Image: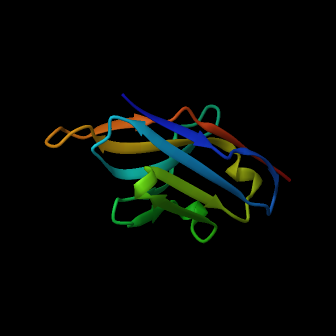
């Protein structure tokens, strides 16, 4: 079993910053693309940012220039640095990862439990 554990959410004023972390643990041979998604009540979960194992990144238009995704492959951890936060960034943030448990195994996908980010105006 592979688990993703997020941390770093909380309450911040508009214009402030937060850094989210997500650590993967369990039986892991390799981790491919990792990413952050967010969801608000009544809405579908949406992509925030993704990063491949070599470091290629992709961002939602709404966060470009404000958020930075990075990863530490040695620690199986992905980060999301969020700057210039806006009330519209308020959501539950979820970590996601594609991984292989062993050589030759197919890729599997796993979600974290989510961490809440609240941005006050």
- Residue 48 image point, x, y percent: 53, 53
Left or right, 113 with respect to 40, comes to left
Q: Quadrant of residue 54?
A: bottom left
x, y percentage for residue 34? 41, 51
Q: Is residue 34 above or below residue 28?
A: below
Q: Is residue 61 above or below residue 112?
A: below
**Extreme residue toward the left, this view:** 104
Nearer-the-camera pick, 97 or 23: 23
Residue depicted at x 45% and y 52%: 75
99 horizontally vs 92: left or right: left
- The N terminus is located in which quarter? top left
Q: Is residue 96 left or right of residue 94?
A: left
Task: Residue 80: give x, y in percent of width and height.
Answer: 58, 56
Q: Which of 28 and 55 lies nearest the eye of the viewer?
A: 28
At 69% from the left edge and 44% from the top edge, which residue is drawn? 9
Tell which residue pokes out farthest to the front in this image. Answer: 74
Q: Residue furthest toward the bottom?
A: 65
Residue 82 position, x and y percent, is 66, 60
- How did the renderer colour the structure? rainbow
Q: Against 92, is 15 above or below?
A: below
Identify which residue is drawn at 59% across, 61% down.
Answer: 62
């Amino acid at each position: 079993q592979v688990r993703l554990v997020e941390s770093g959410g909380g309450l911040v004023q508009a214009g402030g910053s937060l850094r989210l972390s997500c650590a993967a643990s369990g039986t892991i041979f390799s981790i491919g693309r990792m990413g952050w998604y967010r969801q608000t009540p009544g809405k579908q979960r949406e992509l925030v940012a993704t990063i491949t194992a070599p470091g290629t990144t992709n961002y939602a238009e709404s966060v470009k220039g404000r958020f930075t995704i990075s990863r530490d492959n040695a620690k199986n951890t992905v980060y999301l640095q969020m700057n210039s936060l806006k009330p519209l960034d308020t959501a539950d943030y979820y970590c996601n990862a594609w991984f292989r448990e062993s050589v030759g195994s197919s890729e599997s996908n796993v979600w974290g439990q989510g961490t809440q980010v609240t941005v006050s105006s």
